[in-house]
Image: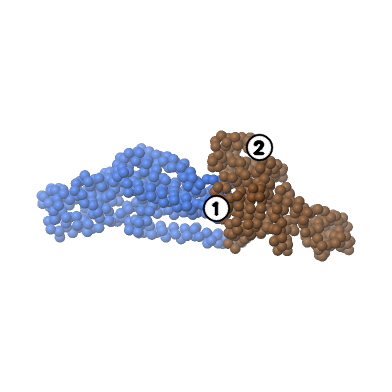
């Protein structure tokens, strides 16, 4: 069983003074998958990744990464992991080739292997034309490709990516995710943190973090299916009036406006939710079209990070994949 | 009015930030205090307790009274007694003493005949301040008449001064070798002090510490290129000193560069140590200055080491520049060899090893 698990944490905590950046997180992350940490800023994603890389000492709890105890065996782990920091951390005043060579040498790679890997990566990540350009003169998308190339240069078994696409346009983001799937196909395990819902949905497994605690775990599909809410869409020409009509209805958990649409989460106990809402709208004479839809990852996220449901996080952890 | 309010807001914000930046705050208070103390106490042109040696070839009670009369002035401290003038010159060359008192066998006859001075003062003139002080000693009306057999009324005086190593008494001869040390201190310490903090500030460090690179590899890799840069600086200063200022180079070039390299390593390591304490490049710069000031003031570069009070000498012994100045002046001006100056060489090596060990131990591959 251990053979299929890349990362296992037990009640892992990391405090900074009184701030509980990571608070008693227990997780199992399977190998050869893209596993996502979804959470708002300050939810503990970066602290979690840094702790798993051995850069931060846990305050309590334990973590095992690729079968190695963290932080005791962190030095042995370093050869086997790649880490792409949230902020661009390669040398801006070195060229693409110089950066790649430097990290290849620091990772004790044979010169011939460095050359072969560089040639392959320049091709894979479309950096050939930029190979003599200094990193500071490159665009966000180009830098990100370079950072991924360097992080995978020594062919690590496990790759940590901390909000890798935050400085990248949508098209580059899509290409970037294609590269990640290619890596997973070759057996690499990828742990990626993000606050983009569409990216979270592409992960094989997902852990939702909020204020340092784990609030939901599972595959995106399972999380969407098991959501403890019914989801309605209200299409209307008067979204503001519609919102006023619906917001105080019993059972309404959350309302979000998306242009001319309202996205409503309702308590699962509510019977005939569509009629329930339609009646409320009609009583205020708001013309609207109400339909029940499938929950999205964003709905899962909203439900998981709501103050009330956070108290029940014990259940969410119990569902660990 | 609005402008004033904004200005005031900025000023208050600066004060708040300053009061929270302990190091800068400490510098604001510390630098003037330290400077005042150093200038006020340490820098004493009225140099006393210059280390001296005696070769008393006369060995009479009169010659002994002369030596004790000289000691009584407190200008010279007689630390060494040797038997020949050659031994005295050796001590002078390696820097053990700055002044040698040579009393010839015919000391008493010279006094009574009164045709020449009775004894010689051998002075390391590469430090003009010491030379000046010794000249004052010759004219000093020290209480010789009380001592039996020391009546110089007929003779031209007790001493003739023989200035060694810088007979023309040019200050640049003294300054240029010292400048090698001062310039290296500033540049070498600053380079490495900033180098590591810079990586931390730019975020490179987070990536670097997730690689298998070891602390000591990082430290040594950082200083290697600067050793070469430092040696180039030495060559430039030495070349200019020789051609423009006509500073004589008595010692061997290999000793000069080897000695300089030891000092460069010690200074670079000091920089690494600073960078392990500094949280920003600005702090690193401040700390470098904090080391630089006492270095130029206490090392003997500006003012003779012997003239400083005991506490300042103790502080100065910790600074690499103090030891390097002794080496480089000894080698360049007096032709001493590194082997002869082994205590200073050992001091630099010790500093390098201790500082490097602390720097490596303080640098953890962790972010916490």
Q: Chain of mark 1?
A: A
Specify whether B276 is left or right of B155: right
Q: Residue visible at 41% across and 41% down?
A: B231
Q: CA distance from mark 2 to mark 1?
A: 35 Å
Q: Residue visible at 67% across and 49% down?
A: A30
Quickly name the residue at label 1: A72
Q: Are marks 2 and 1 on the same chain?
A: yes
Give the percent coordinates (x, y) of residue B244: 36, 39
Specify whether A160 is left or right of B219: right
Determine whether the residue tagged by mark 1 lies in a helix, strand or loop: loop
Quickly name the residue at label 2: A124
Q: Residue visible at 61% across and 43% down?
A: A156
Task: Name, please, the residue furthest toward the front.
Answer: A1
Specify whether B238 is left or right of B222: left
Q: What chain is the brown one?
A: A
Quarter occupied by residue B234: top left
Q: Decide: is B18 above or below B208.
A: below
Pick whichever, B332 or B267, lies toward us. Answer: B267
Residue A236 visible in image: no
Q: Nearer the viewer, mark 2 or mark 1?
A: 1
């Amino acid at each position: 069983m251990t053979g299929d698990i890349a990362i296992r944490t037990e009640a892992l905590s990391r405090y900074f003074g009184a701030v509980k950046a990571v608070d008693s997180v227990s997780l199992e992350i399977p190998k050869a998958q893209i596993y996502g940490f979804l959470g708002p800023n300050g939810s503990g994603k970066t602290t979690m990744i840094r702790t798993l890389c051995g850069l931060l000492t846990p305050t309590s709890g334990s973590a095992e990464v690729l079968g190695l105890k963290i932080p005791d065996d962190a030095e042995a782990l370093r050869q086997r992991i790649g880490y792409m920091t949230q902020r661009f951390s390669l040398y801006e005043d070195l060229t693409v080739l110089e950066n790649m060579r430097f990290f290849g040498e620091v990772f004790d790679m044979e010169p011939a292997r460095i050359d072969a890997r560089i040639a392959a990566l320049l091709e894979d990540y479309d950096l050939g034309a930029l190979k003599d350009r200094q990193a500071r003169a490159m665009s966000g998308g180009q830098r990100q490709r370079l950072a991924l190339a360097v992080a995978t240069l020594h062919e690590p078994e496990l790759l940590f990516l901390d909000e890798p696409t935050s400085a990248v346009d949508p098209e580059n983001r899509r290409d970037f995710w294609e590269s990640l799937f290619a890596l997973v196909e070759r057996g690499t395990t990828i742990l990626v943190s993000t606050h983009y819902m569409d990216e979270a949905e592409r992960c094989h497994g997902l852990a939702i973090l909020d204020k340092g605690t784990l609030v939901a775990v599972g595959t995106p599909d399972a999380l969407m299916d098991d959501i403890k809410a019914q989801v309605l869409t209200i299409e209307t020409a008067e979204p503001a009036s519609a919102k006023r009509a619906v917001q105080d209805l019993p059972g309404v958990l959350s309302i979000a406006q998306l242009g001319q649409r309202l996205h409503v989460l309702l308590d699962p106990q509510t019977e005939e939710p569509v009629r329930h809402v339609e009646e409320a709208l009609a009583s205020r004479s708001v013309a609207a079209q109400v339909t029940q839809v499938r929950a999205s990852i964003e709905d899962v996220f909203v439900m998981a990070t709501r103050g009330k449901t956070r108290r029940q996080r014990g259940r969410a952890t119990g569902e660990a994949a | 009015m609005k402008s004033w309010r904004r200005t005031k807001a900025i000023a208050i914000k600066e004060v708040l930030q300053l009061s929270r930046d302990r190091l800068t705050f400490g510098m604001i208070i510390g630098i003037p205090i330290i400077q005042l103390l150093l200038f006020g106490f340490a820098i004493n042109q009225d140099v006393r307790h210059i280390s001296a040696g005696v070769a008393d070839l006369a060995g009479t009670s009169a010659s002994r009274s002369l030596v004790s009369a000289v000691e009584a002035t407190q200008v010279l401290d007689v630390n060494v007694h040797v038997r020949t003038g050659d031994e005295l010159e050796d001590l002078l060359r390696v820097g053990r003493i700055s002044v040698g008192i040579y009393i010839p066998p015919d000391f008493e006859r010279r006094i009574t005949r009164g045709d020449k001075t009775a004894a010689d003062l051998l002075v390391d003139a590469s430090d003009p301040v010491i030379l000046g002080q010794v000249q004052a000693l010759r004219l000093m009306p020290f209480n010789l008449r009380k001592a039996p057999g020391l009546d110089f009324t007929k003779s031209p005086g007790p001493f003739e001064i023989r200035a060694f190593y810088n007979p023309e008494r040019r200050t640049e001869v003294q300054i240029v070798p010292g400048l090698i040390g001062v310039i290296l201190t500033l540049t070498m310490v600053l380079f490495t002090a900033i180098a590591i903090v810079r990586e931390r500030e730019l975020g490179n460090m987070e990536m670097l510490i997730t690689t298998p690179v070891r602390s000591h590899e990082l430290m040594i890799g950082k200083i290697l290129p600067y050793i070469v840069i430092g040696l180039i600086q030495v060559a430039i200063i030495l070349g200019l000193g020789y051609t423009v200022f006509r500073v004589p180079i008595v010692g061997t070039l290999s000793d000069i560069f080897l000695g300089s390299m030891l000092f460069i390593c010690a200074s670079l390591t000091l920089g690494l140590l600073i960078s392990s304490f500094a949280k920003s490049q600005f702090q690193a710069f401040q700390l470098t200055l904090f080391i630089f000031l006492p270095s130029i003031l206490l090392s003997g570069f500006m003012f003779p080491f012997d003239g400083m009070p005991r506490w300042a000498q103790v502080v100065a012994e910790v600074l690499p520049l103090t030891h390097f100045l002794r080496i480089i002046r000894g080698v360049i001006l007096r032709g001493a060899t590194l082997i002869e100056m082994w205590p200073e060489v050992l001091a630099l090596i010790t500093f390098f090893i201790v500082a490097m060990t602390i720097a490596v131990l303080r640098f953890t591959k962790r972010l916490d």
